């Protein structure tokens, strides 16, 4: 899809998120891990949320997790998402222990449930941005 065809809001990579978005373009899911205390975190930040160290590395995830919570959006609140109705917004708990807000795709609305095993997939919406989403495992 050409960049000018995608009409939804896009993330704007920042210095502390750039590695996450670069990995996503390569179909890899990465989270931050603190070199000082070992804490893992998502979403990407400039400092560790446990000890405030700025010494953060990037850890490649398995991409597997479970649905922690979800909702089904039957009516979009913004015009950019109207053609997607209904869609599933979920919090996925990754095997690595962090939770990530995302969309569940390729899943009938009647099949979604808490504790459902899921696997990451990447939606390459532009040449620069691939959005991590999840589907049933």
Image: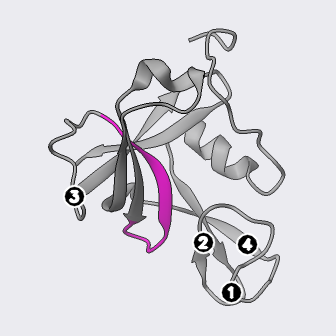
Please tell me which of labels 3 and 1 falls first in the chain: 1
Question: Element at badge 1?
Answer: loop
At a point 33% along the width and 36% down the height, the residue shown is 105
Local packing at callout 2 (Cα closer than 10 Å; few below 14, some 14-19, many 20+) is many
Q: Badge 3 is on which residue?
A: 116
In magenta, the rendered stretch is 94-105
Please tell me which of labels 4 and 3 falls first in the chain: 4
Judge depth for marks 3 and 2 and give the one in front. 3
Question: Element at badge 3?
Answer: loop
Please tell me which of labels 1 and 4 falls first in the chain: 1
The reply to whether discs 2 and 1 touch (Cβ–Cβ < 8 Å) is yes
Separation of residues labelled 3 and 1 (CA atoms)? 29 Å
Q: Badge 1 is on which residue?
A: 50
Q: Residue 123 location, x and y as percent?
A: 48, 30
Q: Residue 55 location, x and y as percent?
A: 79, 77
Query: Which picture quadrant has residue 36?
Result: bottom right
Judge depth for marks 4 and 3 and give the one in front. 3
Q: Badge 4 is on which residue?
A: 56
Separation of residues labelled 2 and 4 (CA atoms)? 10 Å
Observer able to see residue 125: no
Local packing at callout 3 (Cα closer than 10 Å; few below 14, some 14-19, many 20+) is some
At a point 82% along the width and 76% down the height, the residue shown is 54
Camera-nearest residue between 111 and 33? 111
Please tell me which of labels 3 and 2 falls first in the chain: 2
The reply to whether discs 3 and 1 touch (Cβ–Cβ < 8 Å) is no
């Amino acid at each position: 899809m050409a960049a000018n065809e995608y009409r939804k809001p896009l993330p704007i990579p920042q210095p502390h998120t750039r590695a996450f978005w670069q990995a996503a373009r390569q179909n890899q899911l990465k989270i931050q891990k603190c070199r000082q205390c070992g804490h893992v975190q998502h979403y990407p930040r400039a400092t560790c949320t446990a000890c405030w160290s700025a010494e953060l590395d990037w850890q490649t995830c398995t991409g597997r997790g479970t649905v922690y919570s979800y909702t089904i959006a039957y009516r979009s609140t913004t015009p950019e998402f109207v053609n997607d109705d209904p869609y599933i917004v979920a919090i996925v708990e990754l095997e690595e222990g962090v939770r990530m807000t995302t969309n569940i795709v390729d899943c009938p609305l009647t099949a979604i449930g808490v504790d459902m095993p899921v696997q990451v997939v990447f939606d390459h919406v532009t040449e620069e941005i691939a959005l991590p989403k999840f589907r049933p495992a």
